[in-house]
Image (spheres, rainbow, N blue to C red):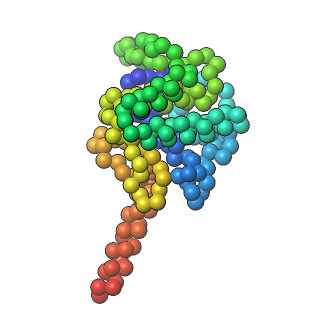
Amino acid sequence: MNIPLSDYTTGATVASDLVNTSPTVRVTTGDALPDPTALARFLAEHDVRLDAPPPTDDDLRLVHVLRMQIRVILETETEEHAVAGASVLVRRAALAPVLHRDDDGRWQWHVPTAPGAPLADELAALVGVGLFGVVRTLGRERFRSCAAPGCRGVFVDTSRAGKRRYCMPDLCGNRLNVANHRARRRLGSVAR
C-alpha cells in the first residue's frame, strides 16, 4: 500500500469511522464489525485497498484491538501525546517516505507499507499518517467527542469550517434534531 502524505483526510476518516464501529459507541445495535465480511465491507466503503489478503478472524481480532488504540489517541489531552500515539501506529508497517509521480506527472510523497504486512498493521499506518496530517494542518483540537447526549463516539473533524459536532452526523445529529423538534412541538401544544 502507498499512503499519500497529501491526503490526511482518508486516514482521519477511517480512524473516526473505525472507532465508531465499536459496541461502546453502538450500544443499541452492537459491534458494526462482527465478522471478517463486515470488515471487508468497511474497507471497501472507505475505498481502502490494502496489500493484505481478504480479512480473516485473526485480522478482525487485531482490528478490534487497533480500534481501541485509535480511540485512546483521539482522546489524548495534548498534541505531543497524539503525535506519539500516531507514531506507534505508523511504525507498525510504514517504510521510509518516497517520491512517486502522480497521473499528472507531479512528484508526490507517499509512505509505502512493508510487503506482507498484516491487515491491521497496514490500516494502522494509514490511520497514523492521517492523524499526523490532521495535527500538522488543523491541530489536535480537531479530535473531538460527540456532542450528542449519551453518545460515547469520538471523531476527527476534517471539515473546512471545523464546526462538526457529531461522530455520525446522519445518526447522532438527526437523533438530536428530532428530539429538539418533538420538545418544541410539546411546548407549543402546552402553550395553546
Q: Which residue appears at 36% of the width and 51% of the height?
A: 165
- With 7 as the anchor, is 48 left or right in this view? right
User: Residue 149: x percent and y percent?
Assistant: 42, 60
Quadrant showing the C terminus: bottom left
Q: Does residue 182 appear in the picture of this structure?
A: yes
- With 167 as the anchor, is 62 left or right in this view? right
Q: Which residue appears at 47% of the width and 41% of the height?
A: 16
Q: Which residue appears at 70% of the width and 34% of the height?
A: 58
Q: Does residue 50 appear in the picture of this structure?
A: no
Residue 165 or residue 150, whichever sits in front:
150
Residue 74 figure quarter: top left
Residue 104 or residue 58, whichever sits in front:
58
User: Residue 30: x percent and y percent?
Assistant: 61, 54
Is 76 rendered above or below residue 97? below
Q: Residue furthest bottom?
A: 192
Residue 94 or residue 72, whichever sits in front:
72
Q: Which residue appears at 36% of the width and 33% of the height?
A: 79
Quadrant showing the N terminus: top right
Residue 140 figure quarter: top left
Is 184 rendered above or below residue 23? below
Q: Residue furthest right?
A: 57
User: Residue 169: x percent and y percent?
Assistant: 42, 52
Total labels drawn = 0
Is 94 rendered above or below residue 146? above
